[in-house]
Amino acid sequence: MNILDAVSLLLAVGLFVYLLIALLCADRN
């Protein structure tokens, strides 16, 4: 696997998790 593929995949997963946590936190309040 290319290093750029790994970096972009990591960024995509990180962004998805960040949005998911933000939605959960917003849903709590």
Image (cartoon, rainbow, N blue to C red):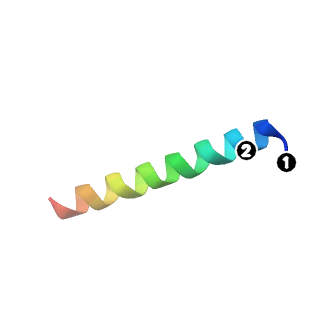
Q: Which residue is mark 2?
A: 6
Q: Residue at x 19, y 63 (%)?
A: 28
Q: Report the front residue among 19 and 8.
A: 8
Residue, disc 1: 1
Q: Residue at x 60, y 47 (%)?
A: 12
* Neighbour tally class for label 1: few under 14, some 14-19, many 20 plus, Cα within 10 Å: few
Rendered location of residue 2, percent (x, y): 84, 41
What amino acid is at disc 2?
Ala
Asked if disc 1 and disc 2 are in contact, CB closer than 8 Å, the reply is yes
Q: CA distance from mark 1 to mark 2?
A: 7 Å
Q: Quadrant of residue 26?
A: bottom left
Picture residue at 42% right of the left edge, 49% below the top? 18
Identify the residue at image location x=85%, y=48%.
1
- For residue 1, above or below residue 24: above
Q: Which mark is residue 20?
A: none
Helix, strand or loop for disc 1: loop
Outermost right residue = 1
| Number of marks present in the image shown | 2
Location of residue 9 in the rendering, given as x and y in whole percent from the top left corner: 67, 48
Please give left or right for residue 15 compared with residue 22 in the image: right
Few, some or many residues within 10 Å of mark 2 (<14, 14–19, 20+):
few
| Position of residue 14 in the picture relative to residue 29 (left or right) | right
Left or right: 25 as drawn, with respect to 10 = left
User: Which quadrant would the C terminus be assigned to in this image?
Assistant: bottom left
